[in-house]
Image: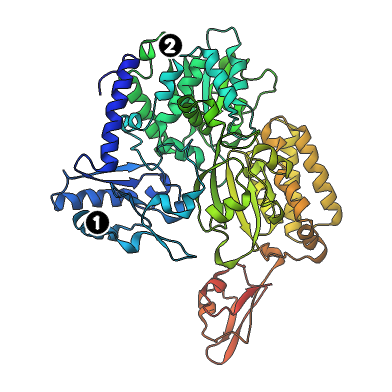
Amino acid sequence: MAKIRNAQDLAKKIGECEGCLKAKFEGKDGKRAIVICGGTGCLSNKSQDIHDAIVNKLKEKGLENKVTVNFVGCFGFCSQGPFVKIFPENTLYRMVKLSDVDKIIENDIVNHQVCEDLVYVDPNTQTKYPKQEDIPFYAKQKRVALHGSSMIDPENVEEALGYDSFKGLAKALTMKPQEVIDEILKSGLRGRGGAGFPTGRKWQFAHDQDNKMKYVVCNGDEGDPGAFMDRSMLEANPFNVIEGMIIAGYAIGAKEGYFYVRAEYPIAVMRLKKAIETLNKIGLLGRHILGTDFSFQAHIRLGAGAFVCGEETALLNSIEGKRGMPRPRPPFPAIKGLWQKPTIINNVETLANVPYILRVGAAEYAKVGTEKSKGTKVFALGGKVNNVGLVEVPMGLTLKELVYDIGGGVPNGKKFKAIQTGGPSGGCLTVKNLDTPIDYDNLIAQGSMMGSGGAIVMDEDNCMVNIAKFYMEFIADESCGKCTPCRVGTKRILEILTKITKGQGTMQDLDYLQELSFATKNGALCGLGQTAANPVLSTMKNFRDEYEAHVRDHKCPAHECKDLMEYVIDPNKCKKCSMCARGCPVGAITGVVGKEAFKIDPKKCIKCGACMSTCKFGAISKR
């Protein structure tokens, strides 16, 4: 691809690429097009093998010049992957296996017949949905940060240009830096990394500093359990995030930017690296971008997986080659950040919103969302929910709509119990909170937070004391140890929670737990410690009865804490088949085949649950 030297070159190239992409999607180039999900989830489920098999089958049929095949980013509906989509008909096949390739090529590509058994079927209505846009999972979503995901090849800059990339940058470079900041301020964009600080204000602080050297840092250190939003965005459309960084650099007067991405994201890192190399070659990174006086270069730094490096000042230390530990604030990074120079730090999703705002304008962007939380939010929806996946919804959508309309509700007829938003830093909200519109202030008011966008659903089988313990194990392990409230406080909180889940707690321990949680929250140096106790405080507030049952009755109401439950066999339901005994790894089950109901010795039982999984007659239960 020829070098793009000015705005006229870019406009011409965008026009050409838009035409090519439209021809691909509408079949006007005389070809069919097959796209395959190339996100981490589907790749781990053999979508690479499916891709290769499709390519080989097309060659075998002599169709390699009549059908294009390429990877695209995440489709979002992860519980239904791997996905294969065919243009121009927009037919979407889900849960595709290697053995389905011959059928797809023969039926669809050769004979133009939809493979009915591979399209999505709504489990409630049994309605078949051959087209992605008709599936209820997508109905209430709006893709802004996920722009281009599942549509374009993330390694092909021409497809990115044909799908709106760098229109925002071209517009920004015709404006003064202050005008760009004003546009971001008017949009109401708030940081999507967790705190929700107004993005334009952060940019303004850095812009106002009189310093020749400034930096933009993209925080891609996504460490929350169950979170995969930033990774998916970088995998699906790295050009969009890079464009957001370049615009931010222009607005504040920075000439360099750093992507800080954890090394556990090899696909995201590889595609980001390729995108940076490509943009340098064609002139959209480097010196005198689009023939202006503005120059900008992007670099990549890999994180080693420390959760605390998601905190912005710890992240800066890590980039500088120091141990990832937070710095006291003030001064804030916008004043003294990377190498003591003015620095803005935005997460992946925040920067992914920026090109859209410049393309459509602040007023149009601000039409979506609530009064104080504009735009959309990306969530990694997981846990006890039917439709696990990556979703982007308008701010103001209720938690109920997220869980039931998009998530498809709780599986196996179980009752909804709680939803954890904000990861380890968030809180657990209950059924009484389901009508809460999703935005920064509403979630905080309910005792949780937006966080970076994790949303874990729990059902009646989850013990909320054990959930709090799980998150505290994570936090205590990830604490950097710099400040005493976090280093010691999280350990002591974990000790009390462990004691309670073992049935050894006292009512006084509950008082200590609450007191210690507030002390840690109020005394910690950085956001990790300040929010560490949120899961404990929210579960104590909403599920106090469960804590007291563990302490007073030495019982776990959800039958999840191993020290407070046991497996039993109902002699009236037992078929005396011995399947449970044969599956027990420690010989804790005895009985006589065909003659005597089997029994479990609680002293030998290690509570692995193998017997319950093995029994086909529902004779084994927890108590």
For residue 294, the mark is 2
Label 2, residues with CA under 10 Å away: few <14, some 14-19, many ≥20: some
Specify the quadrant of the image occupied by residue 477: top right
Q: Residue furthest left?
A: 62
* Mark 2 / mark 1, whichever is N-terminal: 1
Q: Would residue 439 appear left or right of 135 to someone viewing this image?
A: right
Q: Secondary structure at mark 2?
A: loop
Q: Is residue 128 above or below residue 623?
A: above
In x, y percent, where is residue 432?
72, 54
Q: Which amino acid type is marked by label 1?
A: Asp
Q: How many numbered markers are drawn?
A: 2
Q: Secondary structure at mark 1?
A: helix
**Residue 548 can be seen, yes or no:** yes
For residue 182, the mark is none
In x, y percent, where is residue 608?
58, 66
Q: How is the image coloured?
A: rainbow
Q: Would residue 297 appear left or right of 367 to someone viewing this image?
A: left
Q: Would residue 459 appear left or right of 287 to someone viewing this image?
A: right
Q: Residue at x 68, y 50 (%)?
A: 428
Task: Give the labeled residue for mark 1.
Answer: 108
Indicate the quadrant containing the N terminus: top left, top right, bottom left or bottom right: top left
Report the mark closest to the observer, 2 or 1: 1
387 and 259: which is toward the camera: 387
Indicate the quadrant containing the C terminus: top left, top right, bottom left or bottom right: bottom right
